[in-house]
């Protein structure tokens, strides 16, 4: 333990304790719902949506922190370290993520979710398409892709602790894993959103302080940019250092993946069924956009500027922890490094909850033990066990991640988006959308993305995700048009009128 930097470690331990405290605070709400005699499954409503009571600020923070993960605080700045300001510009495509999610889904999504008592995205799809196949495919997609994504995030968190604190990798992974599992298991969605709010504040303050200190250490923005140009002129152009990588068409189309299509990620879109009222929705849009701008612009600029301050590191991914420990006293560095750690934790706890909900609410309750539907106590027990088991499985995988997990993680976000984007949006706004169209859309979207990744990674110069999403959209529309329309009862439930 001689190599451990206790000055950095102690603030991180305090942060972990605070997250535990949030979990135990939220546990009383979970237990109240679990032991309720209410027959409308009050437990799942509390455990998966926090009783649908998110205010505007909490909504904004949980939405932003759920989406902005290790990629935005470690990988993104790491790429900006090597590619320069071009990657900063590219990263800003994510800024309106919260706006698009809440604006596209809007009040209608929240109203319908309450009307049909949906506590997961799959609940919504089941009522809309009345198809067991849709439910099973989407549930399996969530579990497979999210486990891969979470394993990679846990590895990232352990590497962050290992690099900045000096902990052994397995020790760091264990500490992070226990914190995530315990606070998610005992507190559910309420614990996740409250910790997301704390984490969002930490992330924002850390970003501002690290950015300001980096600019001062570099002698001002103008001096830093001049030094970047001396390192490589490509670092201050819109096209980056790697020739032919960041074309105008590719950068523009990248927005589809990290901007608009984020609506299709369940852990993000589920926030749109959990807010309190219209005022909270509007506040969430405003706060979320501002916070996203600060976090994305600040951290990616730090990564790019860091190329003039940190020379010779093994990987660009280490630029944020290296800069932080170099520019700040140990204790303050530990506080600030809680920011990147928070970004990872706020993503994985949300994904863990969604994966658990898919197994318990969407598969076990619907198909294996339907008799549990009105038994909050038993559902509560099963949900807690399932969440813990998934967390333990991810921990085991992350100790020595196999090639399969690494491979799946490359497709995790794209696979989730291909699964959910069009079934959610068309299901919400197009009366003719049906189960056959949804099934074909999901299969064609995932399949074509994997195929193009190998044989045509930049179709017509665009990002790989663009053409698969267009193919899946066109097939959804064609198949829905030429197969049986949804039942009148479904149209009345979702639109209040019979389909003619």
Image (cartoon, grey):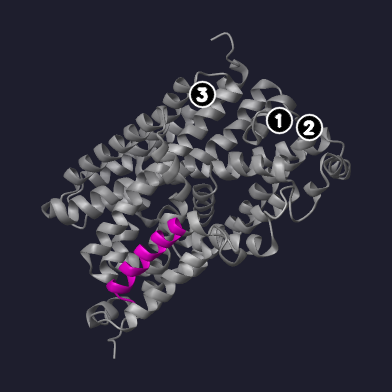
The image position of residue 460, as x and y in percent, is 59, 67
Q: For residue 306, which quarter of the picture?
A: top right
**Which badge, 1 or 2, comes first in the chain's sequence?**
2
Give the residues drawn in magenta, as a range.
432-451
Q: Which mark is residue 186?
A: none
**Which badge, 3 or 1, comes first in the chain's sequence?**
3
The image position of residue 484, as x and y in percent, is 25, 82
CB under 8 Å between discs 1 and 2 = yes
Look at mark 2 in the image and give the residue it sits on.
Answer: 309
State yes or no: residue 439 in magenta.
yes
Residue at 17% in and 44% down: 378
Q: CA distance from mark 1 to mark 2?
A: 8 Å
Look at mark 1 in the image and give the residue it sits on.
Answer: 323
The answer to whether 310 is drawn above or below residue 188 in the figure is: above
Apparent side of residue 406 relative to residue 319 in the rendered image (left or right): left
Q: Residues within 10 Å of mark 2 (few under 14, many from 20)?
A: some
The image position of residue 380, as x and y in percent, is 23, 43
């Amino acid at each position: 333990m001689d190599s451990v930097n206790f000055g950095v470690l102690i603030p991180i331990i305090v942060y972990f304790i605070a997250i535990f405290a949030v979990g135990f605070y939220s546990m009383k709400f979970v237990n109240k719902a679990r032991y309720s005699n209410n027959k409308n499954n009050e437990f799942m409503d509390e455990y998966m949506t926090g009783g649908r009571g998110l205010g505007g600020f909490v909504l904004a923070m949980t939405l932003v922190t759920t989406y902005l993960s290790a990629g935005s605080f470690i990988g993104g700045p790491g790429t900006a370290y090597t590619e320069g300001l071009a990657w900063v510009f590219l990263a800003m495509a994510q800024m309106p993520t919260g706006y698009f999610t809440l604006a596209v889904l809007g009040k209608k999504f929240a109203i319908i979710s309450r009307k049909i008592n949906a506590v997961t995205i799959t609940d919504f799809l089941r009522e809309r398409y009345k198809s067991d196949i849709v439910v099973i495919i989407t549930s399996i997609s969530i579990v497979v892709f999210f486990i891969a994504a979470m394993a990679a995030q846990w590895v990232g968190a352990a590497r962050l602790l290992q690099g900045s604190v000096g902990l052994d990798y397995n020790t760091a992974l264990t500490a992070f894993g226990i914190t995530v599992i315990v606070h998610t298991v005992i507190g559910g969605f309420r614990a996740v959103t409250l910790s997301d709010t704390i984490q969002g504040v930490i992330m924002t303050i850390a970003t501002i302080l690290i950015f300001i200190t980096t600019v001062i250490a570099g002698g001002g923005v103008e001096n830093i940019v001049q030094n970047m140009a001396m390192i490589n002129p490509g670092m201050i152009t819109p096209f980056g250092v790697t020739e032919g990588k960041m074309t105008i068409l590719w950068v523009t189309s990248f927005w589809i993946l990290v901007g608009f299509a984020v609506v299709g990620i369940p852990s993000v879109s589920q926030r749109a069924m959990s807010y309190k009222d219209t005022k909270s929705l509007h506040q969430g849009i405003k706060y979320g956009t501002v916070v996203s701008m600060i976090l994305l612009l600040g951290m990616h600029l730090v990564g790019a500027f860091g190329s003039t301050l940190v020379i010779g590191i093994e990987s660009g991914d280490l630029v944020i922890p290296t800069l932080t420990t170099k520019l700040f006293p140990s204790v303050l560095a530990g506080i600030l490094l809680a920011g990147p750690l928070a970004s990872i934790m706020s993503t994985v706890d949300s994904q863990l909850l969604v994966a658990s909900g898919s197994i318990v609410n969407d598969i076990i309750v619907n198909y294996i033990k339907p008799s549990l539907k009105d038994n909050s106590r038993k559902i509560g027990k099963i949900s807690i066990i399932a969440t813990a088991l998934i967390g333990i499985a991810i921990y085991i995988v992350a100790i020595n991640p196999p090639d399969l997990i690494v491979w799946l993680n490359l497709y995790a976000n794209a696979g989730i988006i291909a699964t959910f984007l069009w079934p959610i949006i068309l299901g919400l706004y197009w009366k003719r959308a049906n189960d056959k169209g949804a099934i074909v859309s999901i299969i064609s979207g995932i399949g074509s993305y994997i195929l193009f990744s190998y044989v045509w990674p930049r179709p017509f110069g665009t990002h790989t995700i663009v053409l698969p999403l267009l193919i899946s959209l066109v097939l959804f529309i064609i198949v829905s048009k030429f197969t049986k329309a949804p039942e009148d009862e479904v149209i009345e439930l979702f639109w209040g009128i019979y389909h003619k």
